[in-house]
Amino acid sequence: MRQINGKLCFLTPRIRLLAVTGILLSVGSLSGPAADETAGIDSRADELLRRTSDYLAQAPFYSVNAEVWQDAELDSGQRFQATRTIDLEMRRPNRLHFEVRSTRHNRGIWYDGKSLSILNRNRNLYGTAPAPGTLDEMLDVAAVRFGMTIPLEDLMQSNPYTNAVRKVSAGTYLGPTTVLGVSCEHLAFTQTNIDWQVWIEDGPKPVPRKIVITYKDEAGSPEYMALLSKWDFVTKLPDFVFNFEPPPGAQKIDMVELRSPTGRNR
């Protein structure tokens, strides 16, 4: 997020991130998948993916922490791994707050059902824009109008399963394993341009514990990995958690829109 002519603009930084997506897949149609769209997924993988998707979709609220590792590239072409942490708090149908922290960036985002606010803590700059009344709609607006990829956005969709399998050609159950000491079930899926894996906690709380996305159409097949921990479905999240209050001395600037509300390029 940069300031250009007094406006907030979401541009690629000098370090080019090669795997720029949310968890699982991008936002897609919320209609049910056709029968042939899941024909290549084996029954056990399908069962587990449905289970974790239903568990997340039915949760009225939750918080989670993610440690993200992402292949990146300097202008010189040198490759390295960039990392950041994400603390997310979500309440259906229309509340969201998360903090993204790294050595280079420190940002917060708030959605209160009416507006979307973004704070660049390093520079003490913020922008606010009107937003629609549901999480699904807000995520679409953020992507289409402002070019934003909301971290972990696919976990917050009202229908995670449909979005996940929409373009999958094959899915495989790879068996039990552990992620940071937690017993999990390992699933792998493939699409035309990406392969993705998810490790789902075994037991009564089938939450994702690790996700890896491999970009097959990018040079060197870069990867995105997220380790998910501190899942909390118990602690209440009152309204004030999602209400943005500018910090002392913060400067408000406009958010640059990539598209007008009608969908036409500006």
Image (tube, rainbow, N blue to C red):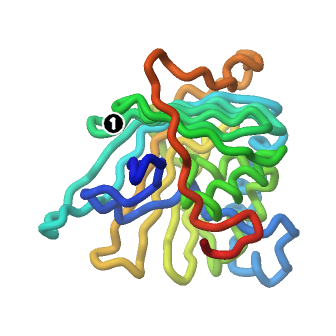
Query: Residue 170: which quarter of the image?
Result: bottom right
Q: Nearer the viewer, residue 127 or 241?
A: 127
Q: Nearer the viewer, residue 139 or 82?
A: 139
Of all residues, the one furthest to the front in this rendering is: 5
Work out whether residue 5 can be spotted. Answer: yes
Q: Is residue 97 above or below residue 151?
A: above
The location of residue 123, given as percent across then percent down, is 35, 32
> What residue appears at the point 55 percent right and 26 percent down from the top-left corner?
230
The quarter of the picture where the C terminus appears is: bottom right
Q: Is residue 247 above or below residue 53?
A: above
Query: Residue 62: which quarter of the image?
Result: top right
Mark 1: secondary structure? loop
Work out whether residue 182 can be spotted. Answer: no
Q: Nearer the viewer, residue 228 or 252?
A: 252
* Count of numbered circles on the image: 1
The location of residue 163, given as percent across then percent down, is 72, 64
Amino acid carrying mark 1 in the image:
Ser
Q: Nearer the viewer, residue 177 or 125?
A: 125
> What residue appears at the point 39 percent right and 48 percent down from the top-left corner?
3
The location of residue 105, given as percent across then percent down, is 34, 38
Q: Which residue is mark 1?
A: 102
> What residue appears at the point 64 percent right and 54 percent down from the top-left corner?
142
> What residue appears at the point 42 percent right and 72 percent down from the top-left corner?
215
Seen in the image, is 249 located left or right of residue 14?
Answer: right
The location of residue 253, given as percent across then percent down, is 51, 40
